[in-house]
Amino acid sequence: MVLDRACQALRSTEMPIPTPGPGQVLVRVDACAVCRTDLHVLDGDLPHPKLPWVLGHEIIGRVAAVGPSVTRFRAGDRVGVP
């Protein structure tokens, strides 16, 4: 779900699946939480957010792909992202 403008309903959309770059991993999200900061952006309480905004960044999932030079994680590893 994407926020295009504060105080407006979220919009359902399909996003392109990114390719992980050097030192990055791609995580397939199993569960995601929305924090209070995201709700402040949604409610228009924070000035000048970078829109469009995908709410939710507290994630549990599995590594789908790894980028070059990644050695700590492998595809299939369960991970949490704060």
Image (cartoon, rainbow, N blue to C red):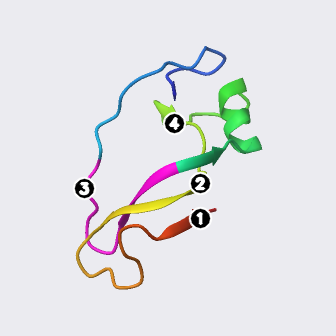
Can you give x and y, in whole percent of width and height, for residue 48 in the image? 57, 34
Along the viewing direction, whichever of 6 and 36 lies nearer the viewer: 36
Q: Are marks 4 and 2 in contact (CB under 8 Å)?
A: no
Q: Which residues are magenta?
A: 18-29
Q: Nearer the viewer, mark 1 or mark 4?
A: 1
What residue sits 59% from the left and 64% below the top? 80
Q: Amino acid at mark 1?
A: Gly
Check residue 25 in the rendering and tell me which mark sits there, or answer none. Answer: none
Can you give x and y, in whole percent of width and height, for residue 19 in the image? 25, 55
Cα distance in 3D space between marks 4 and 2: 13 Å
Q: Are marks 2 and 1 in contact (CB under 8 Å)?
A: yes
Along the viewing direction, whichever of 5 and 62 lies nearer the viewer: 62
The residue singled out by tag 4 in the image is 54
Cα distance in 3D space between marks 2 and 1: 6 Å
Mark closest to the chain's N terminus, 1 or 4: 4
The residue singled out by tag 3 in the image is 19
Mark closest to the chain's N terminus, 2 or 3: 3
Decide if residue 11 is on the left or right side of residue 47. left
Mark 4: few/some/many CA within 10 Å (<14, 14-19, 20+): some
Decide if residue 76 is on the left or right side of residue 4. left
Mark closest to the chain's N terminus, 4 or 2: 4
Give the secondary structure at mark 2: strand
What residue sits 66% from the left and 17% below the top? 7
